[in-house]
Structure formats: structure tokens, C-alpha cells
Amino acid sequence: MAPSLPLLLLTLLLPISTTAGPDPQCTWSGQDQPGTTTLPVMHVFSPCSPFRPRASMSWEDTVLEMDSRDRARLIYLSSQLLVPKKSIVPLASGRRLLQSTTYIVRARVGSPAQTMFVSMDTSNDAAWIPCSGCVGCSSTVFNPARSPTFRSLSCRAAQCSQVPNPRCAGTKCAFNMTYGSSTFLASLSQDSLALAADVVRGYTFGCLRHVTGSSVPPQGLLGMGRGPLSLMSQTQPLYKSTFSYCLPSYKSLNFSGSLKLGPAGQPVRMTYTPLFTNPRRPSLYYVNLIGVRVGRHPVDVPRGALAFNPATGAGTVIDSGIAFTRLVAPVYEAVRDAVRRRVRAPVSRLGGFDTCYVGKVVVPTVTFVFEGMNMTLGEENVMIHSTSGSLSCLAMAAAPGAGVGTVDSVVNVIATMQQQNHRVVFDVPNKRLGVSREPCT
């Protein structure tokens, strides 16, 4: 989960040339239902992603890279612990992870519109995009000079008090923050934001002016968190603080996933678990994980290891940026040992993944038991397989670096590998989150 907390895990997106004509396979074929807004979603490693790596990587290197980026995002999330925080769109998958989200959507900014592929991050609030003249940004930037509806916000604007570390650059509001291993400076701005057929006038976002490090998504980020400058807050009259997504596999060839905005068109038959707010991390989506089953058997986890605690920030969050689920060490070890007992095959190791198998093995289901809802994971969500199929690893790990005051020691993160091919509904007004199986790869 969750990089820094506000990521859906920012994947290290490497820019590639996009001058060639569009691949006919890389198109959104979904159809909106009347009254709905749906955006295609793509993984950043997808063959159709503009951020896929230029050079091919071995399966082992890819997994290790994703694990490394996950760890960076967890550090980012931990940085949020003690700091008080003042329609359907297609989703795509990506490949090399930054400390930001691993899934991207198309957004159009300004008028006339300029298209950007932005990372979708449920742990961040404010949106930011690279603007012309930015130092350290990618080659694809938004040009405010081409949009007559663009304007900079002054230091007196109410929104200036809602960003981290606000400062005045003359009379204009600016802010800086750390994201994963990166830092950036942005000017607070407004312009039109178009998602599918919807146009939001005067959307507030950060115009990136200076970036250091490689964690910031190359074409920007769309914050889907719960803060005042998030997409859900700024579009509350339109989307009623409700959205859902189905995340495709990173092997998916096109925008097969989707982001549905607003209550219309959401699944009718859905089981839900309560959503909680943690004042220590108010932007995150907390749920109450009360147990885990491997096969049909409950896993014996230490009492209190899964408990939600608003005083410390402990609990379980759903995140769109972390690739592999992270469980606090006592819980992970109990789940891992239960899987090993069921598989009964020699175990090997790959980097931070300590339960890998050579050759074909029969893997049990893993069920996350939430208050009022179960999420049962088949092999595709439990194991990650090499391209040749000769090696497979349990796609979970212990949260690293458990220590006093760190997010790793107190937070479990349900990550994108486990969410793939599920519809996940965030119903904030009714304080609930729903999950159901939905193939979208």
C-alpha cells in the first residue's frame, strides 16, 4: 500500500516515445451506461502504457523492482503517520513502479484540452501535473499558456491552507512535499479537468515547477483520497463521493480495467464492510480486517495484530499504489506458514519473497475476512508466476522495517495484486467499501 501514504504505489514510470500512431489494440472498448461516467484504467507496465520500460526486464528483476518500489511507498505512507493533515473512466496497468500508483487513467486538462496519463492514487488528495518550464519533469507537460481558462491561486485563497507546506511565491500560492523518494515544488492552480465526457470547471491542482528524484508520476497524479482537494471532494455534487474500480493485470494489453465515478452504474449485488476514518491518516481508506483463512481453515494470528486503533494509526487500508499486500510480521508469518503447510513442497526465496516454488504446485485459496464481508483470492491473486511458469512466489510479504512510529509496524495494506479482477466500491457517504469478483483483464 499504499509509498508514501498519499500513492497508490507510484510506479517508476519510464517515459517512452509516443510519436507512433495508436495501436488499434490499445483502445477503450467499454460502453458507458446511461448516467454513468467510466474511465479506462491501465497498469503502467502494460504494453499499451506510455510509461512501459524501453528495455525488457527479466521476470525476476521486474518482481524485485516492484518489491523495492513497494518498500519506498511504505516509507512514504509512514511519513503521514504523525503529521496532521490540515462517471466511468478506463484504467490501465503499468510496469516499472515509482513510489506512486501502478494504474493510470487519461485526463484532459485546460481548454482546449491537453491529454495527460495520470496515476490514480487512493492515498493522495491533491492532483498535480507537470507544467511547461518545470525543472526535472518529463518531456510531456501541460502548457498553461495554451489554456485561457488557467489561473494561479493567490496566497489568500482558501485552498492554499489545504495543501502541505504552503508558501507564498510573490502573491501566488505554492507548496512543496515529499512523495516516495522525490520532492517537488508546485504552484496552486485551477483549470478545467475533463474525465470521459464530464468537464469539471475550475479544478484545483498543483502545477509542478521543480522535481527531484524519480518517484513522481511522469504525467501527474489524480488524488482519490478523502481530503478537501481530492477528486471526490472537489466533484462531490457530481459524483457524490462514490467511485469504484476494477484493476486489470499488468499483463493486460489495453485499457481493460475501469474507474466508475458516481453512484450510478455501481453493482447492485455487493457485500460491504464498514469504512473507517483514522485521524492520524485521514486521507486513507481504512477497513476492519478481522481474520484470514487459508483454504477453509482460519489462521491463528496474535490477538490485537489486526485491530483498528485510531489513536496510533494501526489497522488495515485498501491502497491502489502498493503492488503486493503487506501484513504486519506476526500476521504475515502465520499466513505464510499456513500456505507452506498446504503446499508441502521445497521452498526457495527471491529477494523479499520468502515463499517461492519451482515447478507446478497446488495453491490454496486465501480469504481476507472483513467485518461483514469476505474477499476470497484464487491462485491468480495469491501467487505471482514467472513468464516461463517454472517459478512462482507468494505475492505477499511482511511489512518491512517495523519500528516505533513507523507505518510498517502498525498497518496492513491490501494491495493491487490482490485486488486485480475485482470490483472495489468506495461508498464514502454510506461509510462502506464493497468487493466482488469481476474479470477485467
Image: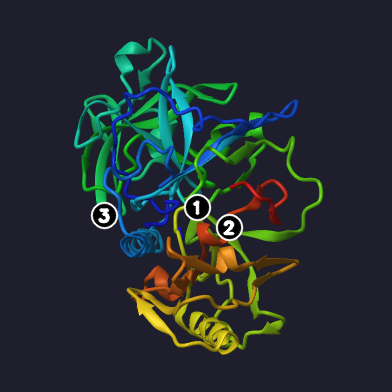
Image location (x, y in percent) of residue 380: 57, 63
Q: In which quarter of the image is residue 391?
A: bottom left
Determine the secondary structure under disc 1.
loop
> Which residue carries the number 2 mark?
419
Please determine whether, in this image, residue 10 is positioned above or below residue 401: above
Label whose residue precedes the other's in the sequence (1 or 3): 3
Amino acid at pointer 2:
Gln
Label whose residue precedes the other's in the sequence (2 or 1): 1
> Which residue carries the number 1 mark?
320
Q: Are marks 2 and 1 in contact (CB under 8 Å)?
A: yes
Please determine whether, in this image, residue 169 is positioned above or below residue 85: above
Q: How far apart are marks 2 and 1 (CA)?
A: 9 Å
Are there few (<14), some (14-19), or many (20+) residues within 10 Å of tag 2?
many
Are there few (<14), some (14-19), or many (20+) residues within 10 Å of tag 3?
some
> Which residue carries the number 3 mark?
181
Name the residue located 21 percent from the left edge and 48 percent from the top edge: 213
Amino acid at pointer 1:
Ser
Determine the secondary structure under disc 3.
loop
Determine the secondary structure under disc 2.
helix
Name the residue located 41 percent from the left edge and 63 percent from the top edge: 81
Name the residue located 36 percent from the left edge and 61 percent from the top edge: 59
The tally of labels here is: 3
Amino acid at pointer 3:
Ser
Q: Do the residues labelled 1 and 3 touch (CB within 8 Å)?
A: no
Image location (x, y in percent) of residue 105: 49, 36
